[in-house]
Amino acid sequence: MSDISLASSHASRNAAEPARAGWGSRAGFVLAAAGSAVGLGAVWKFPYVVGKHGGGAFLLVYLASVFTLGLALLLAEMTIGRLTGRSATTAFRMLGGRAWAWAGRISALNAFLILAFYCVVGGWTIAYLLRSITGEALVADTARLHSQFNTFIADPWEALAFAGLFLVATAVVVIGGVQKGIERAGKILMPALFVLMLMVIARSLTLPGAMDGVAYFLMPDFAQLSGESLLQALGLAFFSLSLGAGIIIAYGSYLPKDAPLVSSCVWVGSMATLACLLAGLMVLPAVFAFGLPPDAGPGLTFIAMPAIFAQMPFGHAVAIAFFLLLLFAALTSSVSLLEPVVAFLIDEYAWPRRRAVVVVAIATFVAGIPAALSFGAWKDVEVFGRSLFDIMDYTAMNIGMPLGGLFVAALVSWRIWPQARTVLGGMRARWLVPTWRGMCLVLTPIAVLAIWYQNL
């Protein structure tokens, strides 16, 4: 069957369906997409990954990855969504043919896998928000905080209960739809996120010894770089920009036809990067001030920050604000992870939104059980020397998302290039067209193969 007939058949199949939802404004789209990119990827994950891989030099490689390959793939995903007005699986089939639908299914699977372990960390944010309200989390002794955190995440009932509660909150937003749910949440949560981050940074930088953390974060020491850290920076760029999971394709499908894609990509990438920089300035100075190792791992934020709040004026109020911030960050990302899987069921099987959200949320909770138990009851269960939580994180960040990005790059630069380049038709910078295609056609496969070679 030809591509034109495939597109026609899907168009006729969807003709009887309700009109597809759309963003109320470009600003709403940018804030929602940036919220997807920011999320816990910036506030929770970015500081400890930078700390693990040497600070400033790693930061430079990460920034280079975001503003080259990252923006190129971000634009490619938006283009696929714009050209089809559909989520990843349907979009790949419409543009590439029946065999390409598997590329979209892999993207949706990536989003599902990430949300399965991500909801566990989201549950931690709710728990620590409640502990901040009661004052239980405000402890100056970091050793005691470390012990409290380990005890909490090892409790299977607490871990599962809070993960479930977090998924319920996510589902409520996504059930609201694009404008009333996702866009409205983004417009509220994203500005609040940045304001609260600035409040915490103002205190973090005044701690004795904090400037050592600032120097570690911003001053590059290239002796700290290795082949692994270079590729980890690239993988983190994929993760922090939500590439390869069908998120941006789904969000791009709700854009009006006259929305400028290039400037939207730059805004999303810039806001995501700004959030990462602010997160580094918020967490790493505190880490050095309290003598914690910067490579302490996923629990770093939950150990370092409460110690700050316990020793500052109005620390109780600031602690509540911070963990509310962290919850906001988690929700902006979890909403974006749930939406492409929901959109898949809506576009492929014409499911009502409410049913799709409920089914996906329940399935995600079940799939997330191993991640929740990997810190307690199943902590001795390992795959290739990694815990179940780590193997899910590793699989998504280093295998699934790069694979999804590779399919996106191949579709745009090889299969549908004449259509794809039309989104740059009005650009004065003529060099942008061949540069974009070169990054997708040449640089992306090289980068993805390098990531796989290093990790496998």
Image: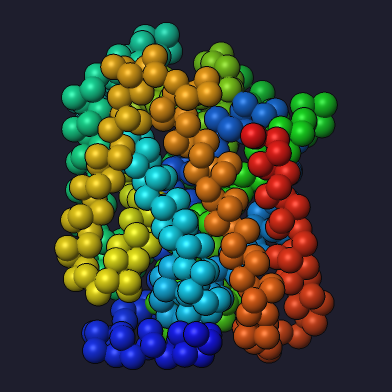
Indicate left or right for 171 with 233 as reference.
left
Q: Is residue 283 visible?
A: yes
Q: How is the image coloured?
A: rainbow
| Residue 23: x %, y % from top left | 37, 77
> Image quadrant of residue 389?
top left
* Furthest residue in direction front, as rendered: 1
| Residue 216: x %, y % from top left | 69, 28
Indicate left or right for 190 with 68 as reference.
left
Residue drawn at (30%, 40%), measured in percent from left and top? 367
Rendered-image quadrant of the C terminus: top right
Residue 252 or residue 368, whichever sits in front = 368
Q: Is residue 48 above or below residue 421?
A: above
Q: Is residue 145 visible?
A: no
| Residue 373: x %, y % from top left | 30, 24
Residue drawn at (47%, 68%), measured in percent from left and top? 101
Q: Is residue 309 above or below residue 232?
A: above
> Image quadrant of residue 410?
bottom right
Residue 381 or residue 434, whichever sits in front = 381
Q: Is residue 213 above or below residue 121?
A: above
Residue drawn at (53%, 87%), measured in percent from left and top? 2
Residue drawn at (52%, 31%), measured in percent from left and top? 283
Indicate left or right for 233 with 23 as reference.
right
| Residue 236: x %, y % from top left | 59, 43
The number of discs equals 0
Q: Is residue 352 above or below residue 324?
A: below
Indicate left or right for 44 with 348 as reference.
right
